[in-house]
Image: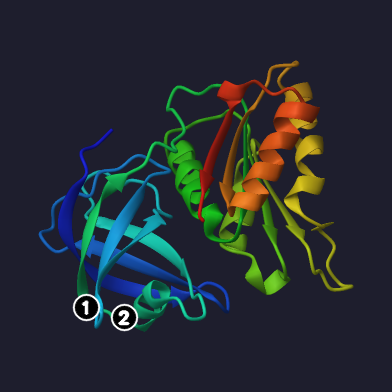
Amino acid sequence: MFPSRPFDARLVTTRRLTPSVRELVFERTDGAPFQFDPGQWVNLVLPLPGGEIKRAYSIASAPVAGSPRFELAITQVEGGPGSQYLHAMKEGETLRAIGPQGLFTRGKDVAAPSLFIATGTGLTPFRSMIQAALTAGDTAPLWLLFGARYEEDILYGDELTRWAAAHPHVRHEVTLSKATNGWTGRRGYVQHHASELVRDLRALGGGADPHVYICGLDRMVGSVKDLLRNELALPRKHVHTERYD
């Protein structure tokens, strides 16, 4: 683990990922490398008129040796002062950050298959984990189950589809709870599909239990966790969770 320290960060570039999610690429203003483990998060200190507030965001990019940059994906929440401030930031503006922080990481020596289950921006730590694993030459199965309401809400869809096409051990599954008639993928909530994928990974691994990482809102995380533990008897040490609320 790397020590968590305050630093100033400059907004370098932004882009719209979905109608409600904006990607922000920051870099340390001192040019020093920003070192973190995939899955960790940073606190942003936001100077609002009523006083400073802190908001925590998982890092969406994988660590790059010597790089001062890191990427975040921020959902614009109606009436949310933190997300409103960040969505209004202009390139070149700076703010205070504290990090890295968090223990929701995937060990570099994990040889067992991994299933990542996310909704919304809960995908961001998994993008970091998968990208880092691919860069390191990891060949263990890396399967992602992502849930959204509509097709327009799919985060990093093109990128993840390319990764899956280029790497046979990577699988990208999307399920939509409000899919249109033209949608050909999975339907419903992630809870409806988690058991199937865990069983498939067990069969692929000769009966070995996969590691399952779950990130999103508390209700989803709790529901999937209970399903894995009670229905599939997945060992406690193989279930890893991070909640956003």
Figure quadrant of residue 109: top left
Q: Nearer the viewer, residue 4 or 141?
A: 4
Q: Residue furthest front?
A: 50
Q: Quadrant of residue 102?
A: top left
Which residue is at 20% across, 73% downward?
Answer: 94
Most foreground residue, 190 or 159: 190
| Relative horizontal placement of residue 92, taking residue 173 as reference (left or right) | left
Horizontal and vertical percent position of residue 169? 64, 35
Task: Report x, y in % for residue 171.
Answer: 68, 43
Q: Is residue 145 above or below residue 183?
A: above
Q: Position of residue 192 (x, y in %)?
A: 81, 47
Residue marked by disc 2: 89
Disc 1, disc 2: CB below 8 Å? yes
Where is residue 92? Give x, y as percent: 21, 78
Q: In the displayed structure, does residue 109 sit left or right of residue 114?
A: left
Please, is residue 9 above or below residue 136 in the view? below
Which residue corresponds to the image point at 56% horizontal and 58% vertical from the top-left?
159
Determine whether the residue tagged by mark 1 lies in a helix, strand or loop: loop
* Three-letter code for the amino acid on which mark 2 is drawn: Met
Query: Which residue is drawn at the image coordinates 56% and 47% (left, top)?
Result: 215
Horizontally, residue 146 falls left or right of residue 86, namely right
Residue at the farthest left position = 30
